[in-house]
Image: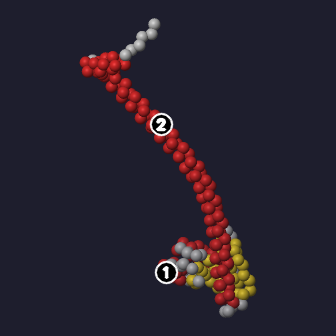
Amino acid sequence: MTSTIDIDELEKKILYLLEHDQNFRRMVMDYLELEGILERLDNIEKILKRHNEILSKISDILEEHMGQLVELRRLQEIMKVELSALTESFYAKVFLDDLLTREEIIRKYRNYRIDDLDIDLLVETTNKVYIVEVMVKPKIRHVGDLIVKRDLVSRRYPGKEVVAVLAGAYIGDDVEEYACSKGIVVCRY
């Protein structure tokens, strides 16, 4: 048997219970509060889902950019080597052209290797041997390295004066002063 409840009657009973029954009132408040919390949690879940989608897209973009960055760094290293080689070649050519106006060249070697040391340019003339180190922006320690190379070449070419040359574009005053004090010729081009 089904009973029908009069809505107006039900409302009156609920209002009466809310006014007079503290336990009922707490139960309704807890239910309403729980509903609010659940609704807020649903909203937070939707927001988190949207944020996760955005983060996923950002992650994909970052991964793509990292690949591009790796490629750019690879290309940068290639360009650095090529630019260094071009710079050395240019300064070696300028030095040789200048030297040809003053001395007769017997032999010249680019990227000369003596023991385990590299020399950018070694030029032998009738009376002298020039060792030329080319650096765009040399430091004091490079002058020390050049002194070691000069001493080594001096032992290989007894009887000839060995002239160490530091060539570059951005040679600081402190480096030039130190190099000159050690008998190294400095060429700024």
Residue 58, image x, y percentages = 55, 49
Residue 147, image x, y percentages = 59, 76
Residue at the spot 30% in from the left edge and 19% down from the top edge: 12
| Total numbered labels placed on residues in the image | 2
The residue furthest top is: 1
Which element type, helix, strand or loop, lies under badge 1?
helix
Residue at the spot 57% in from the left edge and 80% down from the top edge: 169
Q: The residue under label 1 is which amino acid type?
A: Asp
Residue identifier under label 2? 45
The residue furthest right is: 106
Residue at the spot 67% in from the left edge and 92% down from the top edge: 102
Q: Is residue 128 above or below residue 136?
A: below
Residue at the spot 45% in from the left edge and 37% down from the top edge: 43
Q: CA distance from mark 2 to mark 1?
A: 65 Å
Q: Is residue 97 above or below residue 44?
A: below
The residue furthest left is: 20
Residue identifier under label 1? 173
Residue 14, image x, y percentages = 32, 19
Q: Earlier in the sequence, mark 2 or mark 1?
A: 2
Indicate the quadrant where residue 17 lies.
Answer: top left
Label 1 CA crowd tier, 10 Å (few <14, some 14–19, many 20+): few
Which element type, helix, strand or loop, lies under badge 2?
helix
The front one of 108 and 160 is: 108
Indicate the quadrant where residue 127 lies.
Answer: bottom right
Q: Is residue 178 visible?
A: no
The front one of 83 and 139 is: 83
Indicate the quadrant where residue 100 lies.
Answer: bottom right
Residue 143, image x, y percentages = 56, 76
Q: Is residue 105 visible?
A: yes
Quadrant, the N terminus: top left
